[in-house]
Amino acid sequence: MTESTRLSLHVPEPAVRPGDQPDFSNVSIPRAGSVPRPEIDAAAETMRELAYSIIRVLNQEGEAVGPWAGLLSDEELLAGLRHMMLLRAFDARMLMAQRQGKTSFYMQHLGEEAVSCAFRKALSRGDMNFPTYRQAGLLIADDYPLVTMMNQIFSNEADPLHGRQMPVLHSSKAHGFFTVSGNLATQFVQAVGWAMASAIKGDTKIAAAWIGDGSTAESDFHSALVFASTYKAPVVLNVVNNQWAISTFQGIARGGSGTFAARGLGFGIPALRVDGNDYLAVHAVARWAVKRARRNLGPTLVEYVTYRVGGHSTSDDPSAYRPKTESEAWPLGDPILRLKKHLIVRGVWSEERHVQAEAEIMDEVIKAQKEAESHGTLHAGGKPPLRDIFEGVYAEIPPHLQRQRKMAGC
C-alpha cells in the first residue's frame, strides 16, 4: 500500500484583524501615468497586463499625468468635485436621520464617491445602469432631485416607489437607473440582457452593470460574462472592489484569480483595473469602455480599486472585523481630497472656497431634508396609501388580491 497525503482545504484569511496594525503592503500601486492607454479597438489579448495593474492619473503632487489624463475641462472637474461633496453631505444627513429613527436603514458611499460620480459623466442620455445600493452617485451626478431621493429613503407619502422598496433602493428610468435589487448579482446578468435587447432592436443605447467584490462569487456574475462575451453585448461590466463584502474580506470572492479584472481574460473580454479614488482615472477608463461598447466592439470588465470607509450599512459594525484605523492607512487616499488638491494645483480652487462650498452644500442638503420630512418619515407624517401595495404587479388584479384589498378596506 502506498502512503497518501491527507487532504485539506485552503481558507483565505485577511492580512490583519481588529487590534492589529493595518497593512496594505500587498496592494501593488504603480506610478501615476505609467499604465498605457490602448486604442479603443485594441484586441483583448494585447492588453492582458491591464487586468493586473492599476490605471492612475493623479500623482502625489496633485498633477494629472500620463496617457489617460487631459480629458476633462476645469468646469467639468469642478462639477465632479461638487457632485462628490454633495453625495458625502447627503450620506451624512441620511445616516443621522437613520440614527434618529426617521428611516429604518441606510448605506453610505464614504470613500467610494468617485466611482459612480465620474462614471455617470461618461454616459449619454438613454443609457441604462443596473446598479447596486452603493451607486447613488449615478443619480447625484445626473441632477436627480435630492428631495425625491430622500422621500424614497423615508418611505413617505411622496415616495416615488410608494413604500414598496427598502430605503436606498432607488429607481428612475428617466435617469438611466434601473431599480436596485437587494439580492446582489442579479443586476449583472440583467444588464447584459438589456444591452443585447438594445442591439437586437438596432438602438444606440448601452448598458452598465454594477457589482461588488463579494457578489462576483455568485453564479449570475459568470453567466453575465458568458453571454456578454459570446454575443459581444454593448455593456460595461463594473466591479467595485472596496475590499469588504459586509464582514468578509475580498480575498474569499476573488479566489486564486489574482484580481477581479483577471476573470474577464478567460472570457476574452478586455479587462482593466483603475484607481477608484482618482476621479480623472475613473472617468477616463469609463469613457474608453463606453466608446468600445458604442462602437460594437463588445463588453469591457472594469475593476475599481477603492475602500469602503464606513460600515456595510447602518446594521453593521466594521470594528468587529477590521482595525479601526484601517481606512487611514488605505494607500489610495480620499477621492474628494485628491480632486480638491488637483484643482488647487490647477489654480481654479482654494482651501477657502472649499470650506465655503462645504457649508453651501450642507445647507442645500438640509433644506432638501426639511422638505422631504414635511411629507413624512418612518414614524411620523404621511405614508403611501395602503391600496398601493396591490398595484404595479398585475395588469388586471386577480380575484384573491381583490378580496384582500377589500378586507383591507382600500
Image: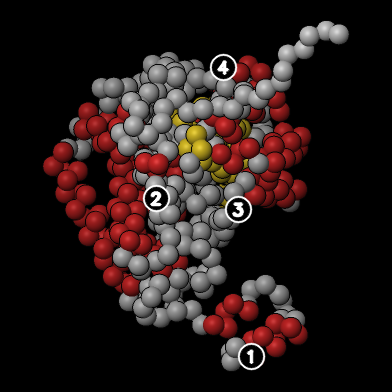
N-terminal label among 1 and 2: 2
> Marks 1 and 4: in contact by CB < 8 Å?
no
SS class, disc 4:
helix
Q: Which residue is mark 2?
A: 108
Q: Is residue 69 above or below residue 112?
A: above
Q: Which residue is mark 4?
A: 49
Q: Amino acid at mark 3?
A: Asn
SS class, disc 1:
helix
Distance, label 4 to label 2, CA atoms, is: 33 Å
N-terminal label among 3 and 2: 2
Residue at (64, 73) in percent of width and height? 392
N-terminal label among 4 and 2: 4
Distance, label 3 to label 4, CA atoms, is: 32 Å
Q: Nearer the viewer, residue 140 or 349?
A: 140
Q: Amino acid at mark 1?
A: Met
Q: Quadrant of the C terminus?
A: bottom right
Q: Residue furthest right?
A: 1
Residue at (62, 46) in percent of width and height? 185
Distance, label 4 to label 1, CA atoms, is: 63 Å
SS class, disc 3:
loop
Distance, label 1 to label 2, CA atoms, is: 39 Å
Residue at (21, 49) in percent of width and height? 357
- Local packing at callout 2 (Cα closer than 10 Å; few below 14, some 14-19, many 20+) is many
The part of the image, by quadrant, that contains residue 5 is top right
Q: Which residue is mark 3?
A: 183
Q: Image check: 245 left or right of 47?
A: left
Distance, label 1 to label 3, CA atoms, is: 31 Å
- Local packing at callout 4 (Cα closer than 10 Å; few below 14, some 14-19, many 20+) is some
